[in-house]
Amino acid sequence: GPYLARFDRTIRRSGLACADNVWIWGSDWPPGSPRHVDCHYAFKVYAVKEAVRRGATSVLWLDSSAHAIRPLEPMWQEIEREGHYLCGEYAPDREKLGQWASDHCLEHFGITRDGAMKLPLFSGTCFGLDFTNPRSRTFFDRLLSYAVPEHFNGTHKSRLRVPGAQIPGEEGKRMSDDPRCQGHRSDEPYMGLLARELGM
């Protein structure tokens, strides 16, 4: 589609100076990945896993909705320096992890909704990992273990009448009864809570 064509065009123009390979997943799934309908956004984790299998030591994941407006070297430099590149998706004064994590997710990490409302929401649209860094490998291995329907499946909607949110069907009823929760953003709350736990 148009997003993928724009991604390909802009990444090849601005991103290849610092990347050995660009792998684009269009109409097929990465090896071993469940379909999106079966496990929401798990394909991202499996695409990174496949890049490592192909020999990549550092990987920068970008959603097809992303496009390069300037060279990507600063991202790669941060991956090399810090072992990872993680960024916030939304304005930090507006979006919090606690707004977009299910009760199940928070309980799994032993964090309250109040505590989660103090944490930023990381973006699943863009993240990078240096697989020669032990902490980054641990982060990824654990994220891969969470890439199952029990953890990733959710909805971006709340069953409650939260301002700006829609009312979904049965799926949304599993997310939370807390009016601050607007839904569950699959990989993003797990990334944020893993990063917190690992000091990233």
Image (spheres, rainbow, N blue to C red):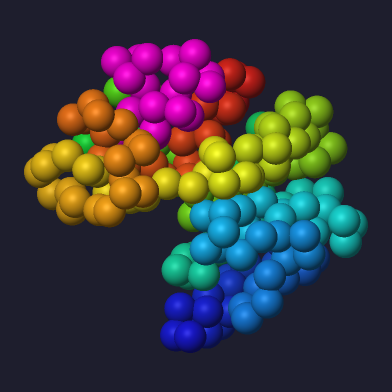
Q: Main secondary structure of the magenta part?
A: helix
Who's the residue at 58% across and 18% down the image?
A: 197
Q: Name the quadrant containing residue 195.
A: top right
From the viewer's side, name the closer residue of 122 and 185: 185
Q: Name the quadrant containing residue 142.
A: top right
Who's the residue at 46% across and 35% down the image?
A: 189
In the visual, does 41 lie left or right of 80? left
Is residue 136 visible in the rendered image? The answer is no
Q: Position of residue 62 (x, y in %)?
A: 56, 60
Q: Position of residue 71 (x, y in %)?
A: 56, 63
Instruction: State which region is magenta.
Output: 98-116
From the viewer's side, name the closer residue of 133 and 76: 133
Quadrant assignment for the C terminus: top right
In the visual, does 32 lie left or right of 102? right
Query: Is 101 a magenta residue?
Result: yes
Is residue 152 visible in the rendered image? The answer is yes
Check the image and report above or below for 140 versus 178.
below
Q: Position of residue 174 (x, y in %)?
A: 36, 38
